[in-house]
Amino acid sequence: MSVDKRKMAVCMLGRMGDLIAVEPMFRAIAAAHSDCWRVWYTTVAFASIYRGSPLFHEVVVVSDQEDYLAQKAGFPPDAIVYEFNLKGRKVITRPGETHSQFPLLFGLTGNCPVSCQDEGPRFYLREDAIPPVSLPGRYAVFHCASNGRRRQYPAAHWDRLAKLCMAEGVSVVEVGLHPILTCPGVISCTGRLDLQVAAKIMQGASLFVGMESGFAHMANAFGVFGVIIAGKLKNYPDYNPYTGYYSPAGNGCNMVRFYDEFPLSLPVDLPAEVLLRALRGEPMKYDECAIFCLKHQVVRLQRNPVMRLLRKLAEPLYSMKLSLLAHRNKHH
């Protein structure tokens, strides 16, 4: 640490997607404290994201929240501290400390002290990031897994989408911890890749196809058009966790989903049609894709035997309600 500079520490131990999404916030914080020695505390899995970036002078790896809090106890009294998503009673503000704790729901939500809500993220790619394989001229990056059992999409559906890409002359490069694609011709870059290497692969892609995940946030940062399989998320049927290019206004992605349902219920024909449009250079607008998915979901509901029965049972009640309203209006 530079002895003549005040320390400014940022700690965020969250997931890859959050860490990339909050880059506009980190950027604004760094600009607000340009005269400080800026240190980022994170876990080893994510340390390479901002190591060597202009936002931080130093990256310190901690094992977990307890490790960070132990190191925080040794901070200088005048240190400026920003903490994200830390939980528990041990997260205590010291007298005279500038402390900000944010619950991050969709990357940039929360009571942030800087204005960055409309900014898209940047990824600071290092020159020493070299892909493990030779990459083709035109390729799509596939990431076929996401956190949570209910957020998965069948492997057979992913294979169909990959075959569609290759049939249109676009190679397929798969990333992620474990391979999902089984069809011939896929270039596998799965496994525990350094995130700088994964970013180098993403930077050269023509298209991103995958789940709503950390790699989708990476594609957003590089401006790679995305076809994203999304699904139910608590009470947010039409959620969008992105700013910038992948935001609804940016039109940089198509989120393919049935609202308030998990991805497993999504027929592969829908993402296949959306993907084909993108491959042929005529991608849907963000809102156009949303309406496309909603129409198909309504048609599916109308064909559902249970929904048809409920509708038939409700029709007499609805007619009775209209008659009562007409009677009331006539006599009042």
Image: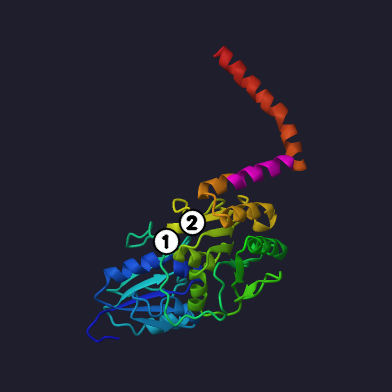
Q: Main secondary structure of the magenta part?
A: helix
**Residue 233 seen in this snapshot:** no
Q: Where is residue 283 drawn, in percent x and y?
A: 54, 52
Amino acid under disc 1: Leu
Q: Is residue 102 magenta?
A: no
Looking at this rendering, what residue extends furthest in the left direction? 4
- The residue under label 2 is 252
Alpha-carbon span between mark 1 and mark 2? 18 Å
Classed neighbour count for the residue bearing mark 2: other residues with Cα under 10 Å, few (<14), some (14–19), many (≥20): many
Q: Is residue 310 above or below residue 84?
A: above
Residue 148 position within the rendered picture, expressed as x and y whole percent measured from the top left: 63, 66
Say which residue label 1 marks. 108
Residue 13 appears in the picture as rendered: yes
User: Start and end of the magenta stretch?
Assistant: 292-303
Instruction: Locate residue 261, reporting x and y percent.
Output: 64, 53
Q: Which quadrant of the figure contains the N terminus?
A: bottom left
